[in-house]
Amino acid sequence: MSRCLLISNRLPITYDEKINNFKASSGGLVSAIKGLDAEVVGCTFEWLGILTDDIASELIEMVRHETVGNLKYHPIVVPKDLYHHYYNEYCNNVIWPLFHYERSLVMHTERGWKSYCQVNLIVAEEILKVAHDDDIIWVHDFQLMLVPGILKTKRPKLKVGFFLHIPFPSSEIFRELPQRKEILHSLIQADLVGFHDLSYMNHFRSSIQRVLGENPLPERSLGVYPISIDSSYFRDLADSVATREFITKYKENKKEMKWILGVDRLDYIKGLTLKLRAFRKLLKEYPEEREKVQMVQIVIPSRTEVPEYQKLKAKIEQLVSSINGEFGTPAYMPIFYLYHSVCAPELSALYQLSEVLHVGSTRDGMNLVSLEYIVSQKDKYPGVVLLSEFTGAHSTLSYAMSINPWNVTETARRMKEAINHPEVKRRAEISAMQTFLHHYNSSEWARIYIRDLISSRPEKKTVILPQEGKFPWMNLLAGKRVVIFCDLDGTLAPISKFPSDVRLQEPMIDLLKKISATSAEFVIVSGRDREFLEEQFLGQGFTFPLAACHGAYYFSPAEEEWINLVSHDPLKWKSSVMDILKMYTSRTPGSFIEDKGHAVTWHYRNSPTEFASFLANKLTFELEETLTNQPAQVNRGKKVIEVTSVNANKGYFVEQWLQRMEYLPDIVIAIGDDTTDEDMFDMLQGRTDVKTFCIKVGREKSRARYSLPDQGAVRDFMGNLLHSLENHESSVS
Ligand code: GDG
């Protein structure tokens, strides 16, 4: 059975100063994980979380060595002050409000972000200390968004998943975050990023495109996994003796009154003031409901030292007392307001005694209270869930009654409808949702996520070059005839804003010169035109064979001239393509056309990202339509669209080249970063008569079996290649 290391900001225990010991703590993730069945999920769990260094070290050691239920805890110790700046100044003052669309409450401090980086680094380093290569790493929530990036950079082979428990906001909001790039760069490195709701995933996707200007991640790296609860625990709790005692006690006071229950942590995202205003509206607009309905609102204290929360509390309490004052009588108190948490059996009793549960959050990642309420209902007169459409649970609970909490008048009307909802309908609706939650519990949630994480990013085939090392197969080069087909832009030289600025740099020039002095054959296969390659390579004294325009033209150093390998006349298709490209260029600022003979390229790297990507989609479609039955094809590369003659194709070129060789080489290596290099990989990996090693430069999906993380890594690769080839030379001589 594999081991899953689960990492969250906190361990599911809270230090209690009064008893100088830990107490089990509650919360969404805790309830979900508590119920995980290792057999069902298919792995054992260890939980890593932060404890601050003000807690006695003996106590921390005790936590480290105890197993709680089926879980082992692994505390990560962080200095208290640092934790405070990270948690309060960045997590709670920046990410929490921004991701819940409360922009006016965001407060940036440099110290907050710095501390966030520091704590994320401490956590990641601790994970790296304890993780084995075959462990599954599952990082949770917004407090640890930099961890996946650090883990993947330091140990690319680790399987790392990330799950966000809060909403991911619209890219319009997200792009206001000063550290938006750092956060996205880290998250996109995770093998699987999970969300509660499809809308959150879509926002994440469009943020990647807007902020990083990159194509969205492949399907397998993203997913929607609405969290669930330990359903059988809540069902058993509903029938427990302790719960029944609470029910008996409360029933006496409740009498014939109908209860609308609310259970919310004190937070501006919970829509508490809107909820209270809606209740006031109900009593005002529908006087027939007065003295028949009561609101029971539990508010769990939270962040009591923060002025914003103190203000919110005062506002809530003022509204409660004004409503009670306005509509109350000596025999009727409209609102029962509790500002403290209750024990589990008491909560279950309240779930069962209330005819309606009201969740009015203005934004809420999921909202587990609504799920727990449903599972706790009994057959006889079950309850109704009034559920804000701005919760993640809204997509899961299809029979809940939807509300838009901002529309107070409509919410009041829905409250009336919910109170008077007929019993037959209540039963049918609750039972459908109970059946769903019975099967889809927290174990099922984790099982599905972990299954997807294991099968995510099918990189098993792809071996990433270790930073300091080399591919093991490089040892095979000794004594073999080796041919290397190599791309230029994005592979040998970094991509530049303007294609004409691209130049080979030292030490690459020196490495290439040394490689060309070995017995290996080195062939440049580029999309560039003949003139550019001549200037770059011949001009600098290189004597490589060169293929320009994706292999449409070939320069043989022996013959000292260019040969046209494509028989079609490009003029046939070029003029109509040019007309279309000129039209798109005139409406897309920063874009331009490059004519390379058998290929024409439209570049939009320097254009407004979103607008240009939108036009690029349209242009591709239009070009494909125009070129039906023409000997030309449309290819999309990195911020370029290219039309080439059908045989101006790197795969076709490499095939021809091998055919013309007197003897087949023993080993062929192909390396490139762009989509046009995929043709080369495809052709070579399909051959059985020669040993091939195809290497993709960059992290995008590729058909190549090997990959290098980025263009910078090509230099190390070339150094290692040279070394292996030279070893071979010296062993031969
Ligand atoms: C994040 C996201 C997402 C509450 N009061 C009492 C009590 N609770 C328990 C409930 C429930 C949990 O706390 C609160 O559930 P949330 O869904 O609000 O979870 P959070 O961890 O606060 O929030 C949220 C969640 O993560 C999971 O992904 O749903 O959107 O913000 O389990 O029962 N339990 C007891 N007494 C109380 O007074 N015993």
Image: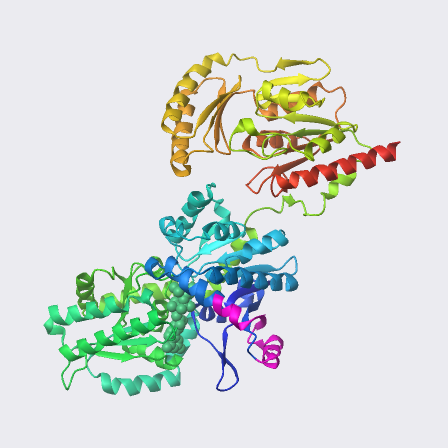
Image coords of residue 383 (percent x, y): 27, 71
Task: Point out the image quarter for the C terminus.
Answer: top right
Q: Is residue 61 magenta?
A: yes
Q: Which of 579 and 98 is in front in this view?
A: 98
Judge left or right: residue 5 versus residue 204. right
Q: Which of 58 and 199 is in front in this view?
A: 58
Residue 717, quarter of the rendered image: top right
Image coords of residue 615 (percent x, y): 38, 32
Bounds of the magenta segment: 56-85
Residue 210, quarter of the rendered image: top left
Image coords of residue 642 (percent x, y): 49, 26
Image coords of residue 566 (percent x, y): 57, 15
Q: Which of 722 and 653 is in front in this view?
A: 722
Q: Is residue 499 magenta?
A: no
Residue 379, quarter of the rendered image: bottom left
Can residue 575 be spotted in the picture?
yes
- At horizontal 56% and vertical 12% (from top left) the residue drawn is 567
Can residue 381 be spotted in the picture?
no
Q: How is the image coloured?
A: rainbow
